[in-house]
Amino acid sequence: MDKNNVLDFVGREDISDALTALLKAGTQQLISQAVEAELQDLLAQHSEYRTSDDKMGGGAQRILAPV
């Protein structure tokens, strides 16, 4: 028995049916919303940090600064 139901995904970027496009767009939107929510949560956790002139952002700049 050499039958199997494994699909070959080579060239999957070229699939252009409506369902795949809908799923791809929905997935991208969900990921974007999740990243935005995580960022807002991070900024809220550190909102008490202020710059020397009492503006928000001092803490976020320290936390999110590249290492």
Image: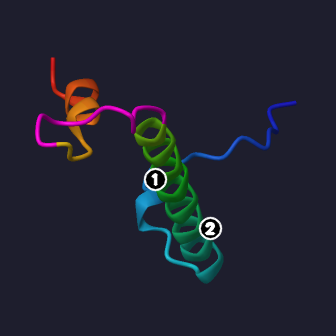
In the rendered view, how is the structure colored? rainbow
| Left or right of residue 15, residue 61 in this image | left
Find residue 42 and report its image quarter: top left
**Extreme top residue here?**
67
Quadrant containing the C terminus in the rendered view: top left
Residue drawn at x 28%, y 35% as measured from the top left = 60
Q: Is residue 48 magenta?
A: yes
| Left or right of residue 67, residue 41 in this image | right
Residue drawn at x 60%, y 76% as measured from the top left = 22
| Left or right of residue 16, residue 30 in this image | right
Query: What is the magenta range?
Result: 45-53
Q: Is residue 32 magenta?
A: no
Amino acid carrying mark 1 in the image: Glu
Which of discs 2 and 1 lies nearer the camera? The answer is 1
Residue placed under numbered mark 2 in the picture: 23
Earlier residue among tags 2 and 1: 2
Residue drawn at x 25%, y 36% as measured from the top left = 50
Residue drawn at x 15%, y 25% as measured from the top left = 66
Residue placed under numbered mark 1 in the picture: 36
